[in-house]
Amino acid sequence: MNWIVASAKWLGGLSMLAILSIGLKGCLGEHIEVHGAGASFPAPIYARWRALYHREHPDISIHYRAVGSGRGIKAITAGEVDFGASDALLKKSEERALRQPLLSIPTVMGPVVLAYNLPRLEGELTLSGDLIAGIYLGDITHWNDERIALLNPGINLPALPIRVAHRSDSSGTTHIFTDYLSEVSEEWRNDVGRGKRVFWPTGNEWAGDGNDGVAHRILLEPGGIGYLELKYAQNAGLNYAALINRAGKRVRPTAKAVQEAEQNTPASPESYLKQSIVNAPGEGSYPISAFTYLLVYRDISDMESHRAHALIDFLKWVLNEGQPEARKLHYVPLPEELRLQVLEDVASIKLPPLPTVH
């Protein structure tokens, strides 16, 4: 029997246990509430998953607050929530602050886009890593800069000042974006670096809280530009740029381009989880692609029994029934081999025993 078949049998048994526990809770007439907090990047797909799961399990409510990756990590570390969420894997210093080992569970992939507010611009803007770094370093200050014009022949660029929007909170989307800039710009890497919160050379006048806050800042005045997850740009009616990737090709933020970025990124020798898929090789790779993660302790045997089993059942639902929903909101499902590996990890989480009903 190969490991996939064995895992499937084991997971099936564990899933049935969770289902039995949930059914039991429903019979007792009680309502189970599971609470999480963290990244805003995946909040639209998490909202859809929570609603669909609740429809199937009306006695269970999965609550989620999109407070940013930094706050999500702090909340799970402090034991304030049942699960956290982050667009970045934990740093060593964050791991040391944990009361016990934490499991980072990838849920979907998605693109970070450069959205802009140029109302009368005809044609789609194209940007490169050098241009984006120049804008965020404060070296490129107007939209009609000759360096932008050179990459956008035939487009009449306005002589507007560039208003640079970024996140005000500790953000996984910021980590993805600054990780990309650190890969494509030596000056950015040396002077600013990568992180969930960084010192912004352009100042904080146009900072926004969450992905939706950045969208709002971009919309405030013509000339705005900012980085945010694709769905937020679409919801706000913002245009977003095609990007020049590592292979020198112009690429739009499509599901196929995100998949290619993942496929073309070498696996980490330390873990099946890829640390980063930004600036991936390959002609079709979208350069600012990323995973997002749910954070759950490997041992939740001290959690209230039915709540713990409901949490694990929800995680399995996300990794099974929930995956096809991702594309409907322009996220990208997990690669199949990775999905199976993650399911095996979820099955290893230590649960409390179910109470005996007399």
Image (cartoon, rainbow, N blue to C red):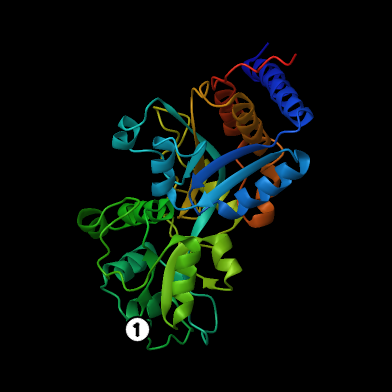
Res 357 → quadrant: top right
Q: Residue furthest left?
A: 191
- Left or right placement of residue 106 versus residue 356 in this view: left
Find residue 171 and report its horizontal and vertical position in percent.
Answer: 40, 53
- Left or right placement of residue 15 versus residue 275 in this view: right
Find residue 187 and report its horizontal and vertical position in percent.
Answer: 23, 59
Other-residue count near label 1 (Cα within 10 Å), few / some / many at <14 / 14–19 / ≥20: some
Q: Give the amino acid at mark 1.
A: Pro
The front one of 142 and 69 is: 69
Find residue 351 and report its horizontal and vertical position in percent.
Answer: 57, 20
Tell me what residue is drawn at x 45 percent, y 39 percent.
80
Dot 1 falls on a residue whose secondary structure is loop
Q: Residue furthest front?
A: 358
| Res. 114 visible in picture | no
Q: Residue furthest top?
A: 1
Say above or below: 316 vs 188: above
The front one of 339 and 157 is: 339
Q: Which residue is mark 1?
A: 161
Res 348 → quadrant: top right
